[in-house]
Amino acid sequence: MHLEENKPLAPFTTFGIGGPARWYLHATSEEEIVEAVEWAKQQSLPLFVLGGGSNLLVSDAGFPGLVLHIALRGVTAIDDGAYRVYQAAAGEAWDTFVQRAVDDNCAGIECLAGIPGTVGGTPVQNVGAYGQEVASSITRVRAFDLRSHDFVDLPAEDCNFNYRRSRFNSTDRGRFIVTRVDYRLTRAGAPTLRYADLQRTFSSGFSPTLAQVAAGVRRIRVSKGMLLVEGDPDSRSAGSFFKNPIVPADLLSSIAETAGKQPPHFPADLEISSAARVKIPAAWLIEQAGYARGYTLGAAAVSSRHTLALINRGGATAAEILALADRIASAVQDRFGIRLDREPVLVGFDAGPSRPR
Ligand SMILES: Cc1cc2nc3c(=O)[nH]c(=O)nc-3n(C[C@H](O)[C@H](O)[C@H](O)COP(=O)(O)OP(=O)(O)OC[C@H]3O[C@@H](n4cnc5c(N)ncnc54)[C@H](O)[C@@H]3O)c2cc1C
């Protein structure tokens, strides 16, 4: 186990922001993870599990404990009738794994192409985009349980997946270290083409292949600054900073009255009480509350291509990003009475002021 001290974390995040980790370990095996957990426990140090750093805002002070960087590698595939089950180690790059599945002509995650981060990060917030979520393909998550100090294999039903939510980022936040995720994909399956933006990239009547859909998703992502592209300041972000709020459908009329127009909305299809609840794009609410693309606050800004992404224009601090986020969330709350929940995870802010969730 090779522990490093005072390791800068900013280079490990897509925001490029954050102070150092007091201790850091690049963990390449389950044995190393167990050893590191024991060590942190003996030292009474807090532990943070780092994947690809694409959904994080690390504080300017850094993290005062051990950062365990999950770097386990390897993917195996087992055919099971019409399906192929991939067992992917948590440290595999997600987008590379998606491309492998697409190249193998296996359907189920093609719309999730271009999302940065690791395999291990995907069950945490039930990653989703363009009409797909990993909840639909994950069958099992292998993890180290910090409570029982043992490895567990959690079937998908036990992960409590919902919109940008699972037990890993809610009821059991910080309890599990994911080491492997199993995805069941459909061999030679048809691509998912539910999302209007994606449908529009193909001429009507055309039946795109999985590879064409994945490429189409990446093209849309580039146009929105939602694909990591070297030198593109709009992609120096954590993706969407706010979740799309799910609100009671009867709130729509009062929102329309305030805005002077009907809000776009979609059925909250993963919600239990879906009939009575709708999802409203947070981007629309933010724009109606007066924050346009390109709005800047110091070195922090709203992306010039996507209202939901807050970006580091170069040299931004975590404090600046949060100040901008707070300003936007307060404006939406004041105008519409809707609280915007943050999507990225805050790291090393425990002693700081309370934040909107
Ligand atoms: C340009 C851009 C576009 C994006 N687009 C999307 C999108 O379309 N849809 C979407 O859902 N997300 C999107 N994201 C957010 C992000 O990419 C995903 O949430 C991703 O799954 C995070 O994975 P990660 O490995 O980077 O996790 P990290 O950012 O490193 O960590 C995020 C959280 O997961 C935990 N975690 C990570 N790995 C493990 C593990 N092995 N075990 C236990 N906990 C772990 C961390 O402790 C932390 O709480 C985008 C981000 C960017 C920068």
Image (spheres, rainbow, N blue to C red):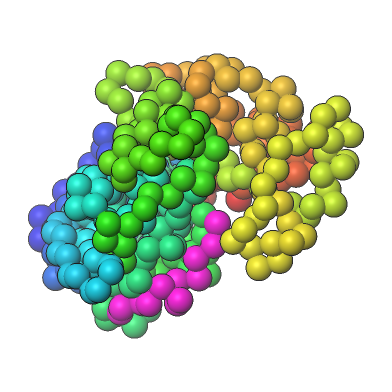
- Residue nearer the viewer, 318 or 232: 232
- Residue nearer the viewer, 53 or 156: 156
Residue 45 lies within the magenta run: no
- The picture places residue 130, in percent across and down from the top left corner, at 47, 43
Check the image and report above or below for 182 versus 205.
Answer: below
Which range is magenta? 152-163
> In the current view of this chain or complex, which residue is farthest to the left?
2
Q: Residue at x 52, y 59 (%)?
A: 165
Relative to 51, 353 lies left or right: right
Relative to 50, 338 lies left or right: right
- The picture places residue 95, in percent across and down from the top left corner, at 27, 44
The quadrant holding residue 39 is bottom left
- The picture places residue 330, in percent across and down from the top left corner, at 72, 35
Q: Residue at x 35, y 20 (%)?
A: 232
Relative to 28, 321 lies left or right: right
Check the image and report above or below for 60 versus 345.
Answer: above
Judge whether residue 181 can be spotted in this image.
Answer: no
- Residue nearer the viewer, 1 or 134: 134
Judge whether residue 82 can be spotted in this image.
Answer: yes
- Residue nearer the viewer, 357 or 137: 137
Q: Quadrant of the N terminus?
A: bottom left
How many marks are shown on the rendered structure? Answer: 0
Q: Residue at x 64, y 63 (%)?
A: 271
Check the image and report above or below for 40 versus 99.
Answer: below
The quadrant holding residue 156 is bottom left
- The picture places residue 289, in percent across and down from the top left corner, at 74, 28
Q: Residue at x 71, y 66 (%)?
A: 273
